[in-house]
Each structure stands twice: as structure tokens, then as C-alpha cells.
Amino acid sequence: MRIATLGIHHETNTFSARPVTLETFQSSGLQTYGVQRGQQCIEMHSGASTSLSGYIRGAEQLGFELVPLIFAATDPAGTISVDAFESLSSEGIAMLREQGPFDGVLLNQMGAAVSEAHRDLDGEFARRVREAVGPGVPIVMTLDLHANVSHMMAEQTDGIVIYRTNPHMDAVERALDACELVTRMARENWRPAKWLEMPPMVIGIFQHDTSDEPMRSVIRSLENVLEQPGIVSASVGQGYPWGDVQELGFAAYALHEDSSEQARVAAQSIALAAWNLRSELYRPDGPDPAEAVRIALEESLSRAPGSGPIVLLDVGDNIGAGSSGDSTFLLAQALEQGAKSWLQTIRDTEAVAECVKAGVGSHVELTVGGKTDSLHGEPVRVTGRVRVISDGRFEDSGGVHAGWRYFDGGTTVGLETDAGPTVVLVSTRVGNMSREQFYSIGYRPENFDIVVAKGVVSPRPAYGSIASRMISVNTPGATSGDMSTFDYQHRRRPLFPFEQDAVYEP
Ligand SMILES: [Zn+2]
């Protein structure tokens, strides 16, 4: 049995000023080698814990031949250019036609990709794949939990399987579910009955952690559905808040052996559980930068020795959700309030170049951060010593959000400011989801009083275990947790909480 896999994997922040071109895909901070083709996919994913890693394991366990075609992923950022999507899509579709026939397709999507021409890129790509393989070949798609799931995605595929955890630690398990589904469909010429239910609501980013209430209750209702006889699979899409798309928001999806009616009832029961919690599922809160730094400084004095750093989660500059990675709101407060033992990254290729030119050991005066747009604070002037320069590559096989393994931060500089804070200047928008990012250049976050992690949930697997406390800071930015700060033009209406009187009647 030959199963093809391909994917264009992107979380598109339509409010981000950074366009995503083919070059962006080719130099990704999220994975070494950018776009991967054929055996390169196997090389980069067999030792990781991504969806593609799960497909590889599925092929071994279930005894099918996995034919990797193309996998293009890049860090979340702005809208994908027409050229980038057309080029990657036509290459993938051509491979599908030339290397076929296939008994099935595993479509490796993120679920929140937007191109200039297709706001529902994932649905459009599924449509093209369907067109290429025809109606008789099963297509099963895996998605990130942040997917904004659309009816086109559901219609053009025979099954969708979505991560169930956030932080995403179950990419491999869900990929194995997808492998079982696609092989059974191919073997038995069977197709499950499917249902996608979209109650008119969004889930706020502060409420995305699936191990915390109220999201835990939503996942519990999903797990209850999975226990029901005849249910083959069920998933929810938490939704990706910064995608201005029609399908923005929460969705519940179920597959039943043979009954659309039972699939509908199952999906609706999950949707209703979420709907009943809608007010609790959207609460943008947390201290502002000044307050957060004040709390962190105060607590760092009173905490027990060796209890670990206070980790400030920079919600508004969530690199893993498409922000610029160069926000300075927290650093500016650190300097103003006199923080000394402080560690954070800032993406700034100009500052990196200045430091590289000056060389290791030299003393520099320069501005850092705040250079991408007007959303992430002003550039901050610092003086300090260039302590280390590296190529920015690091590896983490220890269980990282979504299972990535080989990271590429581009040229990276450890800058120790005269004022105290250590600023690690990076060149790509590599997220703060692995401590190896710092270990690889000689810094131990454990030894600092305060560490900034740009993100909300994705840094938790890396920092939760060493932090004495993690504080989600309500920083402004392209990924602000307050959705009322964005001007949505394309979203469905009504949609809670924008329209408080939205009604859902299954
Ligand atoms: Zn995600």
C-alpha cells in the first residue's frame, strides 16, 4: 500500500506586516533546510515528534509505504504571496501525479494558512489534491489545534484529525490516528460519515492551555464523544485568533462508522459544551508590561534560592503565532525599573550585523528591537559587550511544542548590556520554545532571575519545569490577546464575543 504525504504548513497572522514569500519558506527558523522534498522529509522528521514523524512511525507499524513528496513549513507570519503558494502547490500536485498512483494521501496542514488569493489556503490545497487523485483515493488531513477549520477542508477530505493538546505534545499520536484511518479507508474501501459543527464563538489565547479550565472541560467533552459506540474519530479546532478569515473561531468535528446523523449529534454535543462556556473561554487579562516587571522584580527578591526564574510570557509578541519577535515593551521596562538578572531574545538582523562587525569581546552602543512595525514598541538604546556569536542552529529532541527538532535562529549574538539584562539577538523569528536556544550559546535560563519567553502556551514545555512562576503579560502587539484591538473584515458574523448576542442552536 502506497500512501503519499505532502503539506504546506503555515499559521498566517493576517495582521502581521511581514509577507511570506517563497524565500521565507526556504529559510525557516522552525526547521533546518526550509522546504523539504522526498527523503529530506524523512531525514528531518524521523528523529523529531512532528505529524510527519508520526506518519513515518505509522508506516512502520501498519506496514504501508510512505512516499514523502514535499513539506513546506515556515514560522507563523503574515499572508502568503500568490507566487509562494502557487509554486509550492504546483510542485506538490505535480509530484502527486507523477509518482502515483497512490492508495491514499496524508495531508500535513496546519489549518490556518492564508494566501493573497485564497483566504482558506488549506481548503484550497485539499481541493487541488482531491482533483489530482480523484474521488476514489482517501485523503486524511492532520491539523494543528489552532486550525480555523472550514467546510471546504471537511468537504475535500475523507477525514480530519487535529491535535488534542496545547501545548502540542500529541502530534505523533494524532498522526498515528490519521494513518490508521487512511489505511482502513484504502483497505476496506470504506468512508466514515463526517460532520463539522461551527458554533459562532472564538476562544481567547489566554484560555488555550488544554490542561487548564475552562479548555480542559471542552477536551473532556471531546473525550466523552470518543467513548461513544460507532464514533471513529473526533476533534476540535481551537481556532487561530489572528487569522481574518470567514471560518475564524471554534469548530467541532466527528467521524462515525456510517451515520451522518450520529456524527452530527457527536460534533454538536462538543460544540454545545464549548458554547456553554463561551464567556469563560474568552478573557483577555494579565498585567501590563510595567506591572508585570514590577511583580517579577519583587518576587525575584522574595523567592527561595534555587527555585528558578520568573518567566514573563510576552503575549503580544507571540513568535509562534506570527509576531515580529522584536517587541521591546518588556525590555524597556526592565531597563527603566533596573532589572539586572534578565534574559531574553530580540530578533534584529541590523543589530546582529553591527555586533558581528564589532566582534566578540568588543563594546558596542546600538539600538535593539522595535524595527519591524509600529506595534511592538520603540527601538531601545543599549550599550554592552558582545559575549558570543553563533550560527544560531540548535537541536532539541526533548519534547518541544508540536515536536519540532532542528531549529535555525540565523546568526545569533549574546549581548550583555552594561545595565544588566542579557539580550540574545537572533536573525530569524525562531520562537522561545526550547531552552537549547540559550544553552547552545552558553546561557542557562535557570541562573537568571527573570526570563522573557515570547509566546503564550508554546514556551510552557520548555520553561514550565524550571520557572518559579510564569506570568502571562498583556503586552500590545500583533498577537495581542485582546481581539477587539484588531479590525476583522472577513470573519463570520455573528461571532461571540464580538457580537455578544450571538445565538447557537444546534
Ligand atoms: Zn498551534
Image (spheres, grey):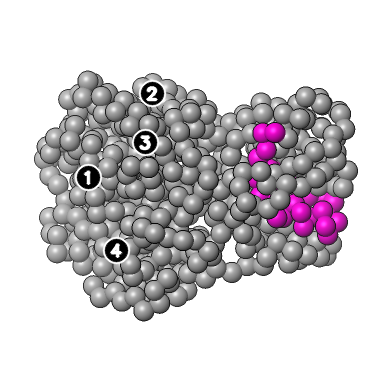
Q: Secondary structure at mark 4?
A: loop
Residue 365 visible in this rendered orientation of the protein:
yes
User: Pointers 1 and 2 in contact (CB under 8 A)?
Assistant: no
Numbered range of the magenta stretch: 326-350
Look at label 2 and name its amino acid.
Answer: Arg
Q: Residues within 10 Å of mark 4 (few under 14, many from 20)?
A: many
Mark sitting on residue 198 = 4
Mark sitting on residue 82 = 3
On the rendered structure, is 481 left or right of 149? right
The mark nearer the N terminus, 1 or 3, is 3
Which residue position is annotated with label 2? 37
On the rendered structure, is 470 left or right of 47? right
Which residue position is annotated with label 1? 157
Q: Secondary structure at mark 3?
A: helix
Report the residue at 71% width, 50% height from top: 378
The mark nearer the N terminus, 4 or 2, is 2
Look at label 1 and name its amino acid.
Answer: Thr
On the rendered structure, is 269 left or right of 374? left
Pick the residue in front: 126 or 172: 126
- Estimate the x, y position of residue 381 in percent, counting from the top left: 80, 45
- Estimate the x, y position of residue 382 in percent, counting from the top left: 82, 43
User: Pointers 3 and 2 in contact (CB under 8 A)?
Assistant: no
Q: CA distance from mark 4 to mark 3?
A: 28 Å
Q: Quadrant of the N terminus?
A: top left
